[in-house]
Amino acid sequence: MEYRICFPQIPNMGDLLNKDMLEPLFHIKIQRVERHDSNISAIGSSLLPALRSRALYSINLKKRIKQGVIKTFNIDPLYIWGTGFMNYKTQEDNIIQLRNTKFLSLRGNLSKCRVERVIGKKLNIPTGDGGLLVDRWIGKIPPKKYRIGIIPHYKEKESPIVSEMRNKYSDSVIIDLGKKPIDVVKEIASCETILSSSLHGLIVADSFHIPNKHILLYPYGERMLGDGFKFADYYSSYGLKDNPLDVNTTNWPTIQSIIEDYCIEPSVVEKKKDEIFSVFPR
């Protein structure tokens, strides 16, 4: 099987896991391609463009022409594994059919429910982000080095609050998501607790069962893309609500409160890892 994935070619750990992690973890070769050439939609918030690439629409002449083209040509399956929608707005509502699309897993229950509305049936598939598998990729887990790791989204790393937080917390480190993904993952693993405005900063922490908290450095959409749906979607896979802490307006948490507030059970995370690993397309 060929593995062709569309993901941004930018220095951001979460996006680059599509190649850096998946290749050694599953002993495969990943080709980075444009959306219309991809056959897997994996780590990230790429579900809407993936569905659009295989959609038959109910309106619009241009889309009807596209519908005719899709019907005419036999296309390879598109595998959906561990991804989800970016925004709350349901732009997929006018899709009436998906051509040769195989749903293997989705990031969260919110995305799963939206897909079920599109396809008109229930899906019996696991939920969880593929980034949870990072611990199986890096091998030996590094020893703890920092009391707390601070992870700004790569578009938010210039926020002055980041350096202020670094100065407030002793034995802390600012983790730059632009470094090599395996180095970022190991640095997160070396922390006892995590504060992150990046979704995959939180997901990697969950992989290692590190107590963590979602923080807001800027309002949704001001720097990073999206309106917060991807966070809510991820936490919905655990039956939890996203409850971000706006560090601009709220007192910063103590390390002890981060530990006490963390409620994702290790056994649940490990079960999700097994499930999403087992359904990866082969």
Image: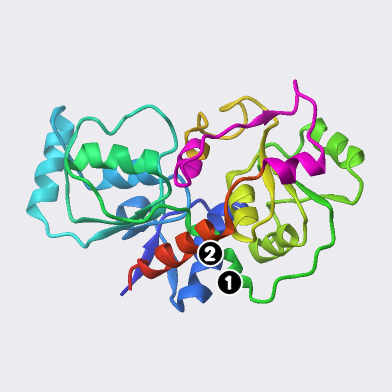
Q: Dot 1, crowdedness within 10 Å: few (<14), some or many (≥20)?
A: some
User: What amino acid is at disc 1?
Assistant: Trp
Q: Find residue 249 and report its horizontal and vertical position in percent.
A: 75, 20
Q: Residue 15: x, y in percent?
A: 54, 53
In the rendered view, would you say 137 is above or below 251? Answer: below
**Residue 123 seen in the figure:** yes
128 relative position to 142: left or right? left
Report helix, strand or loop for mark 2. Answer: helix
Q: Position of residue 22 (x, y in %)?
A: 49, 68
Give the alpha-carbon distance from disc 1 to disc 2, as whole Å.
Answer: 7 Å
Location of the C terminus (image quadrant): bottom left
Instruction: Specify the segment rendered in magenta.
Output: 232-261
Q: Which mark is residue 137?
A: 1
For the N terminus, give its image quadrant. bottom left
Regarding mark 1 in the picture, which secondary structure is present there? helix
Foreground residue, 140 or 53? 140
Residue visible at 69% across and 36% down in the picture: 156
Q: Is residue 152 visible?
A: no
Left/right placement of residue 89 relative to residue 156 reads left
Residue 248 is inside the magenta segment: yes
- The residue that appears at 48% across and 46% down in the rendered structure is 238
Q: Residues within 10 Å of mark 2 (few under 14, many from 20)?
A: many
Report which residue position mark 2 lands on.
133
Mark 2 is on which residue type? Leu
Query: What percent of the width, then of the height, locates residue 164?
Result: 87, 34
Q: Quadrant of residue 208?
A: bottom right
Asked whether the beta carbons under mark 1 and mark 2 sit within 8 Å of each other, the answer is: yes
